[in-house]
Each structure stands twice: as structure tokens, then as C-alpha cells.
Image: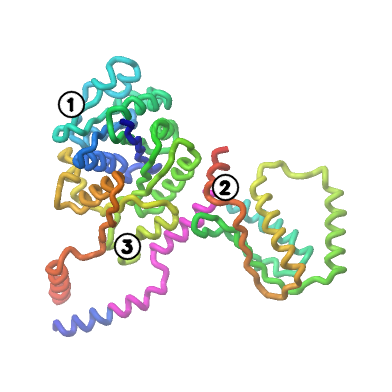
Amino acid sequence: MSGRVIVITSGKGGVGKTTTNANIGTALAKAGKKVVMIDTDLGLRNLDLLLGLENRIVYTIVDVVEERCKLKQALVKDKKNPNLCLLAAAQTRDKSAVTQEQLKDICEQLQKDFDFILVDCPAGIEQGFQNAVAGASEAIVVTTPEMSAVRDADRIIGLLEAKEEIKSYKLLINRVRPNLIKSNDMMSVDDVVEILSADLIGIIPEDTGIITSTNKGEPIVNDEKSLAGKAYNNVARRIIGEDVPFLNLEEPQGVMAKIKKFFSGLTGKEK
Amino acid sequence: MILANLYNKVLGFFRQTENEAVESSKDTACNRLRVVLMQDRTNLTPELMERMRGELVELLSKYVEMDKDALELNLEQDGDQVALMLSIPVIRAKDEDEIKEALEAAEAKESEETSEEDDTNEEESEEETEDSSEDHENDSEENSKETSEKEENNENSDKKSSSKKEEK
């Protein structure tokens, strides 16, 4: 078995790299794939929190590199899905504790046992980014429809294109707000795709459920009703190779909702 | 009451569509982003663009008489490729003697100044200037009397090459 190594990166911080990682990883595992996630954000680890695994971490990636434990010992199994593992970042060390070569080596070892290795990249374009990208052959660039995030994504795409090991990269647009797009107060998905001229792999709507799911340490793909969860599930299916149409976010939820909205608008004005 | 509200709603709807001519914040964002990304990708700062513009004016005035202040030079994105758009309002085509004279004057000036050429820091902008001016030479030889002409130069910096340049 030779698994696919996908790095999830963005340049800008706070656009949802780690959330994307946790959800795509969980969705792939639910689809029956063997998945390992590597948190390379040394010193600022968070992937464990989003998965609710923070209390189970014994060894970290730095322990593996410094040979205090075997690679297999450091893999933390998910609470629900035995197909899903996490290799956590060290919280007490900085980015220089792991080199590009070491990360590449870890990825190569994991490729034998897993279908997917998802590498969570730190923000920025410095050493942390270079390390995270070192072992990967595919990339998902996460951005939001905001100027600063798009600009940083463009920079990241430029850097990825210069790397021979990266065979393909795809764009994931996060925190899309259909209402703002409709009123022309936010760049649309088409605008962002056109400006970055990159292939799209996912459109994730802004969803308050993300906050509560983070609070609980439970990725939102486990919530069947959530639109963001559905969108992340679709991303996972596209990664596997299925042809899944993008969700139409602008469509109103239902006829009843539309009628309700209309009447609340009328009565609201009367007051 | 409800009818009046409905009437207002319908009116409001039409007003909204009328107002769409005004640039929305989304369009502002898109336009600003395009400009800034073009600068990021090509390493051409506004100062360098201004310099390129100045050099182009100097070079092209040898061949045509043009409105120097109205010359427009912009980077535009066309799909994957970055194009250098040059718009030059031509006032009058120069006749052969005038062109010869200007060329000779320029050559004489050049031989005087060979010692003092700038350092090679801005190689890139100079490259692009050369390319676009070559294209333009052909046009002016045809003595076209259009007041404005647009010219596209797709050869140089597509995204990949610009990102590779960045790496250096």
C-alpha cells in the first residue's frame, strides 16, 4: 500500500486549516479509508483539540524524531473510528525541532500502512511551511472570500508551483456567506476561483455549528444535519475520486422557510 | 397596510437593481486584489511601473508623436496569463526624415552615455519593456493613424515563470 500524502495549507492563519484537516480526515475514515493526520504546527498544536484527543496524547512527533518512542507508539487512535489516527505536534518545542528530511521520512513510513496522510501545515511561508510540504505530493489550499486570505493563498500557490514534489493542488473556499455574496458584499466563489485560477475541491459555508463542534471536540462531519458537515463530506468524496456536484448554498432551505421569511419581513415593517 | 408594504417592497426591489451601477464593496475588493496580485506575481512595484512607462515614452517618441501624458500602461490578468496592456494615443505619425533624425540623435546620446548604465537590479522590467516596444515598432511603421491602440504582450510572465522568479 502506498498512501497519498496531502498537505493542508493556507498562508494566512485563522482561515480553517485545522478544522478542514479534522473534518476531511474524519470523513475519509468514515468512508472506510485508513487515515493518519500529522500536526506539524510545533508549539501551537490544536488538531488534538478539534478531535477531542488532547487527553490521550502520550508521545509527539518530536519524540519520534528524537527516538524516544517508535512511530507506531506515537499514533493516537480516534475515539470513535479505529481507521483514524493522529500524530500530534509537540507543544513545548519550536519549528526547528523537526527537519524536512525527518518529516519526509515519517511520511514515507506511514504511506505503507495508511491510505491517506493529511499534513496540517502551520500558518506562514517560513520553515514550518517548508517542513510540512516536504513529504507531500498533493496540496489543498484553504482560503476564505476575503482579500487578505486570497492574497496569501496566491502566494502559497506560487510557492507550491515551484515545488517539484507537489504534483497537484486544489482550492478549498471556507466560510462562504451566501447572504453577503448575494448583496454583493463578499467576493463570490467564482470571483476567488477566477482570481487564483486554481481548481476547486470544496466550498464550505460559514456555520456556527463549527464553534460548538470545536467546543465538544467533535468534527462537524459527524453531524448529519449540518450544511458545513455535508460540504466537508463532499470534499472527502471528491478526494477519493467521486464526482460530487457542489452544494448550492444560495438555495433557500425550503418553501416553508421562504414563506416565513416573507411574512416576518411584512409584519416587521408594520411595527 | 400590507398592500402598501408590498408596494414598497416591489419599488425597493427595482431601486436596488438601478443602484447596481454603483461599484459594490465586492467589486472594489476584486479590483484591488487583481492589482495587488499582479504586483506580487511580477515583482513590479508602482515605482517600477512608472519607470517602465517613462522609458517607453522615451523610446516610442522616436517613431510616433504621441500624447505622452495619456499613455496608459497596465498589467492585466487574462486567465492564467498576465498581460501588459499598453494604450497609446497617437497624435501624428512622423515622416521618414523625422524618424531618422530621432534615431540618430538617440544613437549619439547612447554612445556618450555608455559608461553610465544602471545596475542590473531591474532586469525584469527592462525585459518586458523591450518586448512590448518591439511589437509596437511594427505598428508605427505601418503609419496607423488611430488615436488609441491597445496592445497585448502575452509572451513574458505567465504565473509559473513569475513564481519561479520569485524563488530566486
Which dot marks residue B43?
2
Which of the pair A6/A86 is nearer the observer?
A6
Question: Callout 3 environment at 10 Å: few (<14), some (14 to 19), or many (20+)?
Answer: some
Measured in 3D between alpha carbons, the distance from the residue under mark 1 to the one under mark 3, in whole angstroms, is 42 Å
Which quarter of the image is occupied by the N terminus of chain B? bottom left
Find residue B140 and report its image quarter: bottom right
Which dot marks residue A161?
none
Question: Callout 1 environment at 10 Å: few (<14), some (14 to 19), or many (20+)?
Answer: few
Range shown magenta? B13-42
Q: Which residue is mark 1?
A: A56
Q: Secondary structure at mark 3?
A: helix
Which quarter of the image is occupied by the C terminus of chain B? top right
Q: Which amino acid type corresponds to the residue marked 1 in the rendered image?
A: Arg
Q: Is residue A230 left or right of residue A256?
A: right
Q: Can residue A245 be seen at all in this image of the molecule?
A: yes
Query: Looking at the image, which residue is at 87% across and 68% down?
Result: B97
A21 lies above or below A251? above
Same chain for mark 2 and mark 1? The answer is no
Query: Looking at the image, which residue is at 37% across and 45% down?
Result: A141
Q: Which residue is mark 3?
A: A181
Find residue A156 and report its image quarter: top left
Asked whether residue B152 is drawn in magenta, I would say: no
Q: Which amino acid type corresponds to the residue marked 3 in the rendered image?
A: Ile
Q: Chain of mark 1?
A: A
Which of the pair A172/A208 is nearer the observer?
A172
Measured in 3D between alpha carbons, the distance from the residue under mark 2 to the one under mark 3, in whole angstroms, is 31 Å
Q: Which amino acid type corresponds to the residue marked 2 in the rendered image?
A: Asn
